[in-house]
Image (tube, rainbow, N blue to C red):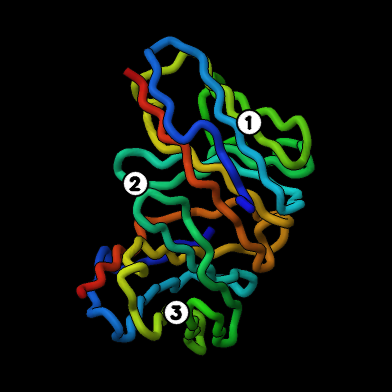
Amino acid sequence: DAKTTQPNSMESNEEEPVHLPCNHSTISGTDYIHWYRQLPSQGPEYVIHGLTSNVNNRMASLAIAEDRKSSTLILHRATLRDAAVYYCILNSGAGSYQLTFGKGTKLSVIP
Amino acid sequence: DTAVSQTPKYLVTQMGNDKSIKCEQNLGHDTMYWYKQDSKKFLKIMFSYNNKELIINETVPNRFSPKSPDKAHLNLHINSLELGDSAVYFCASSLGTSGWGDTQYFGPGTRLTVL
C-alpha cells in the first residue's frame, strides 16, 4: 500500500472545526482513501472513505485534492469525545485484504 | 448488539504458557483479521481469513495459529508465550476484501500481558 504522511499531533478547541491533513503523493488510481480513528483504550473505528470526490457523513467530511495527492479530514465541531488518534490509510482495489496503519495524528481537544 | 466481540478482555499469563483469544462477529462478514498493537501503539496486521481460508500471514511466528471454525469466528491460539507477545490484540471483520472502499469493524481488543 502507498505511504501516507500525517502530523504527529494536533490540538483543537472544543466546538471548533478541525482539519486533519494527510499527504499521499504516491497514491495510485485505484487507491481509496480511508480514515479510521482510535479512541483511548478502544479498537479502531471507521470514520470515512473516498476515492476522488469529497464525501460527507454524520461523523465527518473528507476533502480530496484534485490531484489526489493529499486529503483533509474535517470534523465540523470538535467535542471531547473526538480526542483520538486519526489514521489516514490508502487501500488499493479488490484483493487488498489488509489496512496498513501508520503513526496517525493524535488529536487533543481542549475544553 | 456487539458487532465484533473478543474474549477475554484482559489476559495475564506466565512465559511458556499456551493461551487462546476468541473473536466472533455477528455482521455476516466474509473476512476476518487479527491485528497486534504493541507498546509503541503501532497496529500491524497478523492474519486475514476470507470464508474460513487463510489469506494473509504477515511474518508471524508459527507459535501463533489462527483457527476459523466458521465464517463468524476467528480464534487466535498462541503457544509458548514470550515476553514480546505482550500487546493488545484486535480482531476485525469486513464484508469482502477491504478493497474497493470496504470497511473494517474492530473488536474492543484483548490486552495480553506475559510475565
- Amino acid type shown at disc 2: Lys
Along the line of sight, the residue nearer the viewer: A104 or B26 = B26
Residue B56 visible at all: no
Q: Please give the name of the residue rendered at 43% of the width and 78% of the height, measured from the top-left corner.
A: A73
Q: Residues at marks 2 and 1, common chain?
A: yes
The residues bearing labels 3 and 1 have C-alpha atoms spaced at a distance of 36 Å
Q: Please give the name of the residue rendered at 50% of the width and 62% of the height, measured from the top-left corner.
A: A2
Mark linked to residue A71: 3
Quadrant hosting residue A105: bottom left
Above or below, comparing residue B30 to residue A26 in the picture: above
Asked whether, in this view, residue A51 is left or right of residue A38, the answer is right
Quadrant hosting residue A77: bottom left
Q: Mark 1 points at which residue?
A: B75
Q: Please give the name of the residue rendered at 41% of the width and 34% of the height, measured from the top-left corner.
A: B111
Q: How many labels does the image show?
A: 3
Q: Name the residue under label 2.
A: B41
- Amino acid type shown at disc 1: Asn
Above or below, comparing residue B49 to residue B93 in the picture: above
Q: Please give the name of the residue rendered at 74% of the width and 44% of the height, measured from the top-left corner.
A: B50
